Amino acid sequence: MKKIALCITGAMLALSLAACSPTQKESDPAQAAMETSTGGASDKVPDPTAEVLEMVSVYVPTEERTGLRQVMDGVASLDAESLVEKLVEYGALPEGCQVLSYETSGETENSAAGPGESSSVTAAESAVLDLSSVPSGDSIDNQLITAAIGNTITENLNVRTLTIKENGSVFAENVKFQNEYETLITE
C-alpha cells in the first residue's frame, strides 16, 4: 500500500514539475532573425570607418512661400562651401551654385551663450558671401532666398551680419538671423 501511495505521489510530483517547466514555442524564422539582430551589444557599437559629421541647420523656403522651414543635416566640414551645397541640395539655390569667396571681419565675444555653450565662443561681426548664382524672382522669392541664405550662414558660422553677393554684385546687405523665419511673409 505504501508502494502504491509513493508511486502516485511520485507521478503527481513529476506532472507538476513538467507543468512548471518552460515549453518550446514554434517561432517564425523572420521573428527569430529580428530578435537576434536587434538589441544586442554589437548593434550599439558605432562603425569606426563612418565619417564624422557636423550637425547644421539649413533653412529653406516653405512650399507655401510664406516663410522658412528648418532642416537638420550633417556636413563633413563646417564651412561656407558645404552650407551652400546643402542649400543647393534642398533646392533653395540653383544647381551648380558655388561659393566664389567668403570673408569675415571683426570678432566679438558671444555674450548670449546658452546652456552647454562656452562664453568664450567668438562670432564674426560681418561676413561677405559671394555666390556664382542666386535665383531671381519676385520680391517675395528674393526675401525668402535672402532669409534662407542669411539664417543658414549666420547661425552655423557665427556671423552677426551678412552681405550676399552674386558674381561681385551686391544681392543683399546687412542680413541678420531672423527669429520669426516660419512666418516671414504675411501679405
Image (cartoon, rainbow, N blue to C red):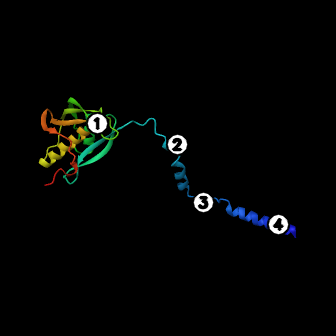
Q: Please give the residue where the numbered disc 2 appears in the rendered image.
A: 42
**Tag 4, which secondary structure?**
helix
Residue 71: x %, y % from top left? 29, 46
Q: Residues within 10 Å of mark 2 (few under 14, many from 20)?
A: few
Residue 121 higher or lower than 139, as above or below: above
Which image quarter: residue 177?
top left
Q: Residues within 10 Å of mark 3 (few under 14, many from 20)?
A: few
Q: Amino acid at mark 4?
A: Cys
The numbered dot on residue 26 is 3
Q: Are marks 3 and 2 in contact (CB under 8 Å)?
A: no
The numbered dot on residue 7 is 4
Foreground mark, 1 or 4, reads: 4
Q: Are marks 2 and 1 in contact (CB under 8 Å)?
A: no
Q: Please give the residue where the numbered disc 1 appears in the rendered image.
A: 82
Which mark is first along the chain, 1 or 2?
2
Q: Residue at 27% x, 38% y: name it.
A: 156
Residue 111: x %, y % from top left? 25, 36
Q: Amino acid at mark 1?
A: Ser
Between 110 and 175, the residue placed more toward the observer is 110
Give the Cα separation between the discs numbered 4 and 3: 34 Å
Residue 7 higher or lower than 102, as above or below: below
Foreground mark, 1 or 3, reads: 1
